[in-house]
Image (cartoon, coloured by chain):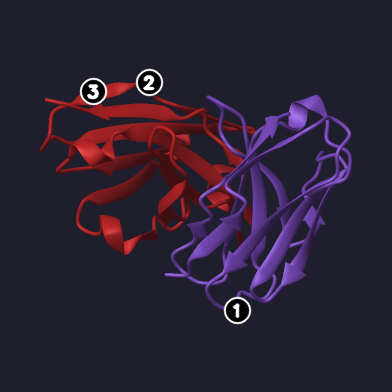
Amino acid sequence: AIRMTQSPSSFSASTGDRVTITCRASQDINSYLAWYQQKPGKAPKLLIYAASTLQSGVPSRFSGSGSGTDFTLTISCLQSEDFATYYCQQYYGYPWTFGQGTKVEIK
Amino acid sequence: QVQLVQSGAEVRKPGASVKVSCKASGYTFTNYDINWVRQATGQGLEWMGWMNPNSGNTGYAQKFQGRLTITRNTSITTAYMELSSLRSEDTAVYYCARVLGGQVWVFDYWGQGSLVTVSS
């Protein structure tokens, strides 16, 4: 199975900050990469797929980039509602696999 | 509006089975694959398997082969996930999720989750 590794595992940030989360695949996955946001007690929410395509209804402060093995999720101006855990997911190779998550906490 | 509504929390003893339902509404049930993903408390997301509601075809992660069965009842637009030979490590929240479509295997709508607790 393709292993997805996110970094960092957690970090603190302030409202208004620009933040970047990294996801690395154990092999080339082209652009078959999605990002999700999950808040405590809630189901994940799809933010981005195909590495950089914003899902309908997702604010434009979220963006994704990368291809091959290295990907990033950027939040350009962190809002209070963005404090959550973020997961990447590859859908290049079966079985689909997720990163371990990155928790964004309030500084 | 698209909704996936799951059945409630369950408690089972080790060795037993559990069946979780996922009622779909707001879209044509047979047009989108349904997947199941689980999450142990404080842990990450783990993909379990998929089903095409039109054909009934399924695919399971190797880890769950032989223990996992995904089925559906198209007349009531409901998918089911049954996990057998339960052990304590299966204690988790189980989610159903709809595939975005067009062979894009990402999940655009999720159920609210069903907590399954395995305890003697």
Image quarter (top left, top right, bottom left or bottom right) of the N terminus of chain B: top right
**Where does the image place residue B75, in percent across and percent down from the top left?**
44, 36
Res. B44 visible in picture: yes
On the image, numbered disc 1 is attached to which residue?
A28
Same chain for labels 2 and 3? Say yes or no: yes
Type of the residue with mark 2: Gly
Q: Can residue A50 be seen in this view?
A: no
Residue B69 vertical placement versus A13 (above, below):
below
Q: Are marks 2 and 3 in contact (CB under 8 Å)?
A: no
What residue is pinned by disc 3? Answer: B11
Q: Position of residue A71 (x, y in %)?
A: 70, 64
User: Are marks 1 and 2 in one subunit?
Assistant: no
Give coordinates of residue A47: x percent, y percent. Answer: 72, 46
For this rendering, which residue is in front, A90 or A22?
Answer: A22
Position of B19 relative to B71 (above/below)? above
Q: Residue at x 34, y 46 (%)?
A: B71
Secondary element under disc 1, as helix, strand or loop, is loop
Q: Which residue corresponds to mark 2?
A: B8
In this structure image, what is the colour of chain A?
purple
Which residue does the image show at 42% across and 39% down from the upper left? B39
Give the quadrant of the C terminus of chain B.
top left
Q: Nearer the viewer, mark 2 or mark 3?
A: 3
Density class for disc 2 (Cα within 10 Å; few <14, some 14-19, many ≥20) is few
Which residue type carries mark 3? Val
Find the distance from the CA under tag 1 to the CA under tag 2: 39 Å
Say if B74 sits above or below B57 in the image: above
Q: Look at the image and give the colour of chain B.
A: red
Q: Residue at x 83, y 36 (%)?
A: A78
Estimate how packed mark 3 is, as few (under 14), some (14 to 19) or many (20 or more) residues with alpha carbons within 10 Å: some
Asked if labels 3 and 1 touch by Cβ distance under 8 angstroms, the answer is no
